[in-house]
Image: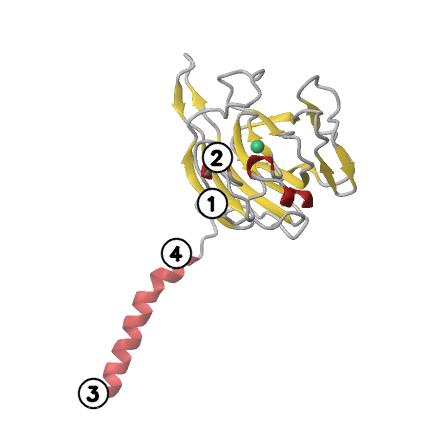
Amino acid sequence: MKVITQKVLIYALVILLFPCALFSQNTDESNPRVVEPVRRNNSPSDAIILFNSSSLDKFLSVKDSSQAPWKVNGRHFTVVPGTGNVQTKQHFGDMQLHIEFKIPRDAKNKEGQKSGNSGIYIMGKYEIQVLNSYDNETYTDGQAGAVYKQYPPMVNASLKPGVWQEYDIVFEAPEYDEDENLVKPPFITVFHNGVLIQNHVEVKGPTTAHNKELPEFAEKGPLLLQDHNNKVSFRNIWIREL
Ligand code: MG
């Protein structure tokens, strides 16, 4: 009787597992394509590299469209206060963006919005705040990782001034119909130093200090970096268009 029970169990298992084996052989053409993944200081094989060393030739001065006037120093570059914002020549819509930044050490001696302020403006319009938010109080929707004046970050994942930090951003661009009505608002997801801080939030409109020269109903725009009078540095910037 015991042997029969064992046999029945084995048959039952085979019958149950057979469909699983069938479905696990996902060999059709819908297989996700292979992409070389990120390694430290590297970028995925299908990314557009906006800066990884030596030259700022992918960026322009917003003021006069001349070569971006910020200071390149080996593998990073730094805001030159007073020279104004810079933006990419290329325009982007839906994207995955990786960007690394370093707040200057002297930010420790400054307070609130004066401490290591810069910003990453997606499409030249929607600011993800860059600020020293390590032991530095300010209004919550103005701290590092905020969608400026719209959404505070879910948590504060900031590191000390002088330490490299990173944002990984997923952006869904706005969509307009033929009559320039908004049919889909933009959405932003942000990871700060690997921690989720904005989870697919609906962007309510451009940040006040955005680049107003850009067309209002565009579905693509430049990546703009803000000169807010602080020597914030950037490196390893890449975008995957989605
Ligand atoms: Mg800012």
- The single residue placed furthest to the left in the displayed view is 1
Out of 10 and 236, give the one closest to the viewer: 236
The crowding category of the residue bearing disc 3, from other C-alpha atoms within 10 Å (few below 14, some 14 to 19, many at least 20), is few
Provide residue 39's location: percent of width, then percent of height.
Answer: 64, 52
The crowding category of the residue bearing disc 1, from other C-alpha atoms within 10 Å (few below 14, some 14 to 19, many at least 20), is many
Name the residue at 43% across, 32% down.
Answer: 150
Of the numbered discs 1 and 3, the one sitting upstream in the chain is 3
Of the numbered discs 3 and 4, the one sitting upstream in the chain is 3
Q: CA distance from mark 2 to mark 3?
A: 69 Å
- Is 178 above or below relative to 116? above
Q: Which mark is residue 147?
A: 2
Label 3 element class? loop
| Mark closer to the observer (2, 4) | 2
Compared across the picture, whether 80 is left or right of 125 comes to: right
| Callout 2: CB less than 8 Å from ligand 1 | no
**Ligand 1 image position (quadrant):** top right
The crowding category of the residue bearing disc 2, from other C-alpha atoms within 10 Å (few below 14, some 14 to 19, many at least 20), is many
Kind of residue at disc 2: Val
Q: CA distance from mark 1 to mark 4?
A: 36 Å
Name the residue at 42% across, 39% down.
Answer: 200
Kind of residue at disc 1: Ile
Label 1 element class? strand
Q: CA distance from mark 2 to mark 4?
A: 42 Å
Q: CA distance from mark 2 to mark 1?
A: 10 Å
- Is 47 above or below relative to 17? above
Mark 4 sits on what residue? 23
Mark 3 sits on what residue? 1
- Is 102 above or below relative to 183? below
